[in-house]
Image (cartoon, grey):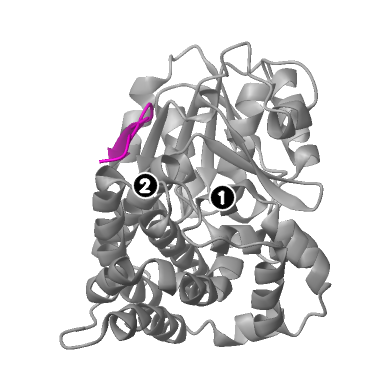
Amino acid sequence: MKKAILNLPTALYCGRGCRSGLAECIPQEAKVALVTDKGLVGAPPLDLVTTIFDEADISWKLISDIDPNPDEETVLRVVKAVKAMQADVIVAIGGGSPLDTAKAAACMARNDGPLSDYQWEGKPFVNAPLPLYALPTTAGTGSEVTGVAVITSRNMKKGINAREIFPKAAFVDPELMIGLPPYLTAITGMDALTHAIEAYVGLGANPFSDALCEKAIELIADHLPRAFSYGGDIEAREAMGTASSLAGLAMDQAGLGIVHSLSSPVCAYLHVSHGLANAMLLPHGMRYNLPARHEKFAVVAELMGYDTTGMTPRDAAEAAVVAVEDLLEELELGSAIEEVVHNAVDFEEFGNNASKMFLIRNNPRGADSKACRSIFETIF
């Protein structure tokens, strides 16, 4: 077995009502900065969390000025607000944007210098971050269990990687996901599936991450259509929450690949949501990687419910791509993807941008700017 390092510093609470454990983690005298996005203001998930604070007599203040695909300006706005209220703790609730923003802000609130020094130059954080607790309302980015905060910078989605970025604890409560609309359920679920598949076939894969990926893929294939069609299905929501965290743990250990590299310019230049970009790109990235990972893609097909008995290795692997394409159709994402592909793009710029992503080094098949450009030309 190749060397594997498991880095799991976040305490993970899962299951219905697990959010109640948040009150036990925060001292009553603490001032809490509650970070979310505008879409959750006044919504039931936020009310469920603020009720915990109110019943425990914990002081809190809302910070909701979070942009999709957050950039350095977004992070610095939150840092300014956190410092102004002299917060002792940050609690982040929402999808990947508020969670990643809060993770970066928790570190920057106690460390000097521009964010770009930590993001691009690899400058280490000298001081410990503010304690951060994460409550995802989507399933999802897996951000609640990773040591990465993805922030848009220089027309790229670039991760800040550090042990300090990990939340202190995460509460994956399906009751916070019940009200998620079908479209958001679909694209966030496809994001989780992309994490699981890319980590599974990547160069950094190991037996530990493989086990996480296989279970995540199976859960998503079985429960994402249910969560999409019946938003109140608590069992499906719970399974998807588990799958998202499993995939998040796996990608943090094994890395990602070409799909996330290709999605960087799509999100940065076209302002497409991360989940939709990955949903659009996943079949293309999988097909590109088929020659390098026939056996693993055949397993993906089986996990997604396709019987590959009697198929050639190539056909069995191709069945995984078909399974993903069928899932996209079941999730009714065709029209949203169609809107994206009608954009005019600079193929050379997109190809160069994607090929410079650090993640692409983990891809099982080499991909230079020419290869990336070719994929974009196929899509757009």
> In terms of depth relative to the viewer, which is nearer, 136 or 267?
267
Tag shown at residue 250: 2
Point 80% across, 39% down: residue: 73
Prevalent SS, magenta region? loop
| C-alpha span from label 1 to label 2 | 17 Å
Point 73% across, 34% down: residue: 120
Horizontally, is 109 left or right of 186 in the view?
Answer: right
| Stretch of the chain drawn in magenta | 1-13
Looking at the image, is mark 1 or mark 2 earlier in the sequence? Answer: 2
Task: Reply yes or no: does residue 9 show up in magenta.
Answer: yes
Q: Which quadrant of the rendered structure holds the N terminus?
A: top left
Q: Residues within 10 Å of mark 1 (few under 14, many from 20)?
A: many
Name the amino acid, label 2: Ala
Q: Residue 125's x, y, as percent?
A: 63, 17
Q: Is residue 9 above or below residue 185?
A: above
Q: Residue furthest left?
A: 309
Q: Is residue 334 above or below residue 360?
A: below
Q: Residues within 10 Å of mark 2 (few under 14, many from 20)?
A: many
Q: Is residue 107 above or below residue 360?
A: above
Can residue 236 be spotted in the picture? no
The residue that disc 1 covers is 361
